[in-house]
Amino acid sequence: QEGPEGAAMAAEWSVLLLTCQPGGCVSAFQRELEARRLRGGLGSRPPPLLLAVEDPWARLGSGGATLNALLVAAEHLSARAGYTVVSSDVLRDAHILILHMGRDFSFDDCGRAFTCLPVEEPGAPAEALVCNLDSLLGTMTHRLCVGSPPGVWVCSTDMLLTVPSAPGIDWDGFQGVRVIAVPGSQAYARNHGVYLADEQGLVRNIIYKGTEAQIQQCAGPDGTVPLVCGVVFFSSDAAEQLLATHVIPPLDACTYMGLDSGAPPIQLSLFFDIVLCMAGGVTEEEFLKGGGDASVRSARSVLWTALRTFPLSMACIPGASYDYMTTSASDHIRSLTLLPGSQPCLLEDGSSVINCLLEGAVQLAAGSVIQHCHLQGPLEIGPGCLLSGLSAGSSLALQGCPLRNLVLQGHHVRLRDLSCRVFTLTGCLDDWQVWGEATYLNVPWAEFFHRTGIREGDLWDAELPRRSCCLLNARLFPVLHTREALGLEDVLWLLAPGAAVASEQLARWRAAWRMSWQELLPCLDKAAELGARRALFFLQGQRKVRRVLLGRQDSSLLPLARSAVHEGYHEAVLGTLDEVASTAGDAGVAARALACIAEILGCMAGGEGGLRSGPAANREWAVAFGRLESGDIAGGVRELAAERQKWMSRPALLVRAARHYEGAEQILVRQAVMSSCQFVTVGQTELPPLGHWVQVACPARLDLSGGWSDTPPITYEHGGAVVDLAVLVDGCRPIGARVRRIGQPELRLVSLGGTPQGEAAVELVCQELEHLRDYCQPHAPGALLKAAFICTQVVRFPSQKPLRVQLLENFRGGFEVHTWSKLPHGSGLGTSSILAGAVMASLYRAAGKAASTESLIHAVLHLEQRLTTGGGWQDQVGGLVPGIKIGRSKAQLPLRVEVEEILVPDGFTQTLNDHLLLVYTGKTRLARNLLQDVVRNWYARLPSVVQNAHALVSNAEECAQALRQGDLLLVGKCLDRYWQQKKCMAPGCEPLAVGRMMEALRPHVYGQCLAGAGGGGFLYVLTKAPRQKEALHQILAKTEVKCGLRGIFLYIVQTPGHFLQLDGYETGHQTSEGIVNHRGQPSLEAETSVILVREN
């Protein structure tokens, strides 16, 4: 249900209680509740109190269990409130949910609540099996109970309940008790309970298995009747009155306090002993008379006095459905079979597989269910079957077995200190509790006895009356044998024994100690069964990890990672990831596996230990990193795993280990990206004279759509497409570099102010190779320039030859490099990558080499990987290739970028110039952190990120088409869509103040977007009217005051040509179209120039 702001609404529980029968399983169920809290299955605000509550008596009834659970809840709330005795005052503002597990279930050892459903929750934060309990929790929390006042909700778990997202229950002026009903057919009602209500919705009576006339009396205008579905709400007043009865005999016997006080047991129904007393059409005499024995009549008298004055209303939910989980195998199979068209090829429509690992050809016919099984083919399972709890070792016994209309189950049984496995076999059509016309394995008992040689005396004691003999108490199932281990074959022979083995199997069967289903029920080890299901689930999870990574699938493994951590299976999953990373033989697969390990380590830290992003150069990890750098992936992964074991003891170490795994992943990403080096071709040309400058001045770039799809590893795992403009800013090329040869055999690295004529801001002299060692540390002085010398191979590093010798031998001296940028740090206009391109272009030329535009684009990719800044290719494409263009890369390695010029209609370039404005927001962009988050989310394959990657590429192609058509309005729509896609890719990239600025501009623009990664820097807008600099300046002046921004400036952008200047004369050219000389508007570059530039 959506609230007024579109946020999902949910009931916020004070206490959630799950009641269960006595028998030592309460701790296992408590663990299940806690597991759901950990994995987010109880919502964003889980109840502070989660309690599994054991009934005091074996047959307490739903009414007694409700009263006991209410007492336990009140006791815990009282203790938390500081009371030393139980106080009903704690119920006044509490929202309590009580879920009853009820009786044992023939088809699931853990009961109806933990019956797993053929349902997946792809949006869940942690991957897990979905049980009926989870389905009911979701229904109650997010649908039925939303908006209800404080009080106590009680819900049975013996039914499958479906409710519309907006059930439409009116709580205005509500008092008393309300029952929830579901519309059903009159035929279904003959075996169930229905409510008789008046026109005001007040309940007159509850009819159970009524006559046709009684049921007809309950029908509405559409002919349906309101079915009792096991859900009741008590207001806090009513709950207080009910709680007060727990000290009054005989109701005190319903609680654990009564048990501890020696009170005799009593059995009460929630609906017929508690709720019914409030029905308006029931008299006190009728109510008391229906109580059975004296103790129940006495209890009813107390309840009548306490609750009779509360109105009992009914809410019948249109569109809801209810399916009671009966003891009929055919009904249960029907409820678990899926809709057509959703199964693998070997599974026919109408079949269902739940929490199973099926290997080989396991063929499943329609109308059959396999759950919690590990089976190995070839196997053929016919229609009407339910197989549950079978291990891989059972597969051989099943081969060739005629499986049709059968229920075959493996059980974990505990006999005092002895644990064992027991198999049961029944027919789909068998009735558990009748004799007479009864069947076993779908044939009459007489036929079964004749076929197997088994006699009645083998199954039932002689003193047991024949009419009491039934399947439920037939000692059919072998449990222990004095000399041999028992297995599945010891029940399968009951189907159709061959003549040769019949007598042998019969003797073996008779020699075994056997139990009936009735005797087995109290011995079922629910904790062991739940543990086995978890183990099988994570065994499948390990197979899924291999399948997804090796198959390069876009499925997210993050929910599975979270679940593995919460359930204690992280070591198994980590081992699988180590195996995949070391044996895949593919750097891309290995990198994603290492990223998954980092996610698990981060999950294990539990939100403690610091931020995920941080340094990753601790010396303890150097050996592992060195192996990866050398190309020894398997050895590197082994070293990482060995080192990891030393960092698992506390959150702070886990977070640091996660950072180093991400560092290792980046090594492999760098190696993948550097495959693009094969597209760098460098030729020889004339060496410029000593002392003559080679100067390159470059435009900035604006990304119009597709950014982030160019970022490794997205660009080579998904494929990328980016539309870019090369632009002047206020008529100037803001980025540039110049290089000249000098006589001294050294490297002089100078960073100037904003122009080539500016004063030196940073000056560095490198005279030894050791001075270049920090080239891969982005924040080291001159790191980019040092990396440029190494990547252009002007200087060989590492090398046995000293720097001085290399420079003298190859160039008869050293080099002096000057760089400049008029753009502020973090502009988002591609400055660093374009500057890298300018430096490499001028350095190549000054060293007597020539490189094409394509070579420069890929050379910058290589440089940025060596520099360890990462980043994609869009900046250098945008700044090195003139005009309007779209760059593309395919989902493959080696990574190759291909650029297509976008040809626009005549005059459209000028139109863009007139409508495009650049706004400096005054906020500094922090792209590095954004980049880490994006790569992390991509490796996690978050569905939103994968879908957004598709959308980015699609929008880029649409934007390119809009430009070809000269459709300014559609270009603006693409810009707006692009900004939404950027925010999806990197949440947090829109500062609050910038958002307010964009809101102020929205009525005046076709579209707008922050340049680059966002987070600050420059905003570019496509105005509705031309030449709007002054008008927007006035709007932003007001916004600056309101938002607290300082330093908002507007700039014009234009498209230039590139310039290569050699000692005072220039080569290259610029376009005549689109250059605008007044301040404040953009202009586009339409032709390729000699030298190309880009930014990061």
Image (cartoon, grey):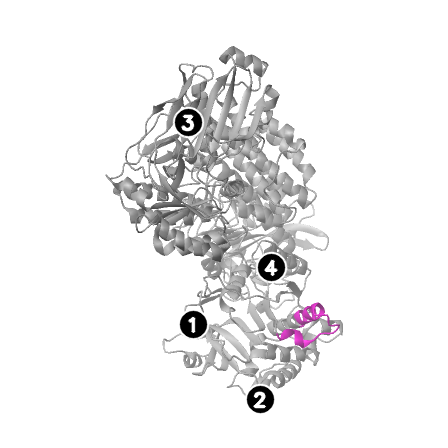
Camera-side residue: 910 or 625?
Answer: 910
Percent coordinates x, y for residue 932 in the rendering: 53, 41
The kind of residue on which mark 2 rests is Glu
Q: CA distance from mark 4 to mark 1?
A: 35 Å
Q: Could you tell me if the residues under marks 2 and 4 are in contact, i.e. CB atoms within 8 Å?
A: no
Pointer 4 or 1: first along the chain: 1
Q: Which mark is residue 285?
A: 2
Magenta residue check for 968: no
Q: CA distance from mark 2 to mark 1?
A: 30 Å
Depth-wise, is mark 2 or mark 4 nearer the camera?
Answer: 2
Pointer 2 or 4: first along the chain: 2
Specify start and end residues of the magenta stretch as a single range.
Answer: 71-92
Q: Judge whether residue 638 can be spotted in this image.
A: yes
Task: Say which element carries label 2.
Answer: helix
Q: Mark 3 Cα within 10 Å, few/some/many (few <14, many 20+)?
A: many
Q: In the image as oriented, which residue stretches furthest toward the left?
A: 906
The kind of residue on which mark 1 rests is Pro
Q: Mark 1 Cα within 10 Å, few/some/many (few <14, many 20+)?
A: many
To which residue does mark 1 refer?
Answer: 183
Q: Which mark is residue 696?
A: 3
The kind of residue on which mark 4 rests is Trp
479 above or below 571?
below
Q: CA distance from mark 1 to mark 3?
A: 78 Å
Percent coordinates x, y for residue 57 in the rendering: 68, 69
714 above or below 224?
above
The kind of residue on which mark 3 rests is Val
- Looking at the rendered structure, the number of numbered marks drawn on it comes to 4
